[in-house]
Image: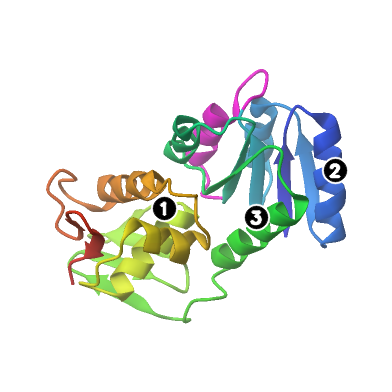
């Protein structure tokens, strides 16, 4: 597995590189967003770990550029703990985030979880889930609408697969956070709302009047089977 680590704090980058290489990963490094985009465009990476606040191009903009050509899982690092900053990261296409300072053991746990999901080790091979004009190929972790491929991030895919596998079952935002992300954000579950909105924009004919991913007001979300 090959990981791109991006941060303008060179000492922090050195520490992450050392610890991740000790886990058996191949690690490349960059120190600004523009360099990260070029490396991601020209090399194959299984995961990107990227700081938000960087010179030349910040992590939010860099993630947006990377999403134009790749669905590689992205973990954002931020020194800020405000909800708005976290949501901006998810809006840009990030899959996960860590607030500095963080425990290196937690970083490694997040890395393992994202890589495991991206590799699809927890899915049933060869399954195609089809509802209406939507289809998920769980072997390839790909989605299509009306026969046209729809590009989803790792977390977007995990979320819609869970909902499609359990039609008409209503999940609270807390349930979805715990199942799809594997942990709690301490009460801030608007991350789920962001991902649901992005899925509707990609999969629904009219996101304002969704046919598939529906809201149970005051409870949560469900997939209309």
In the depicted structure, whether residue 38 falls above or below residue 127: above
The residue mark sitting in front, 1 or 2, is: 2
Which numbered dot is residue 28? none
Q: CA distance from mark 2 to mark 3?
A: 19 Å
2 is within the stretch colored magenta: no
Q: Give the image's coloring scheme.
A: rainbow
Q: Residue at point 37% right, 44% down? A: 190
Numbered disc total = 3
Region rendered in magenta: 53-72
Q: Residues within 10 Å of mark 3 (few under 14, many from 20)?
A: some
- Give the quadrant of the N terminus: bottom right
Q: CA distance from mark 3 to mark 1?
A: 15 Å
Q: Secondary structure at mark 2?
A: helix
Say which residue label 2 marks. Answer: 15
- Give the quadrant of the C terminus: bottom left
Q: Is residue 112 left or right of residue 209?
A: right
Q: Secondary structure at mark 1?
A: loop
Marks 1/2 in contact by CB < 8 Å: the verdict is no
Q: Residue at point 61% right, 30% down? A: 52
């Amino acid at each position: 597995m090959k990981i791109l680590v991006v941060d303008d704090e060179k000492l922090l980058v050195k520490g992450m590189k050392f610890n991740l290489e000790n886990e058996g990963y191949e690690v490349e490094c960059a120190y600004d967003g523009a360099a990260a985009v070029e490396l991601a465009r020209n090399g194959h990476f299984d995961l990107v770990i990227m700081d938000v606040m960087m010179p030349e191009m910040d992590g939010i903009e860099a993630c947006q550029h990377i999403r134009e050509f790749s669905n590689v899982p992205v973990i954002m690092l931020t020194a800020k703990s405000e909800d708005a900053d976290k949501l901006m990261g998810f809006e840009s296409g990030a899959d996960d985030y860590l607030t500095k300072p963080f425990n290196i053991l937690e970083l490694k746990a997040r890395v393992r979880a994202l890589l495991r999901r991206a590799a699809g080790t927890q899915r049933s091979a060869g399954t195609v889930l089809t509802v209406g004009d939507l289809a998920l190929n769980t072997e390839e972790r790909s989605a299509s609408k009306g026969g046209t491929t729809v590009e989803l991030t790792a977390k977007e895919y995990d979320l819609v697969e869970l909902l499609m596998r359990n039609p008409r079952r209503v999940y609270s935002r807390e349930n979805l956070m715990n199942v799809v992300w594997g942990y709690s954000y301490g009460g801030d579950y608007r991350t789920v709302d962001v991902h649901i909105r992005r899925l509707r924009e990609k999969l629904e004919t009219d996101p304002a009047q969704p046919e598939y991913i529906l809201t149970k007001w005051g409870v949560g979300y469900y997939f209309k089977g």
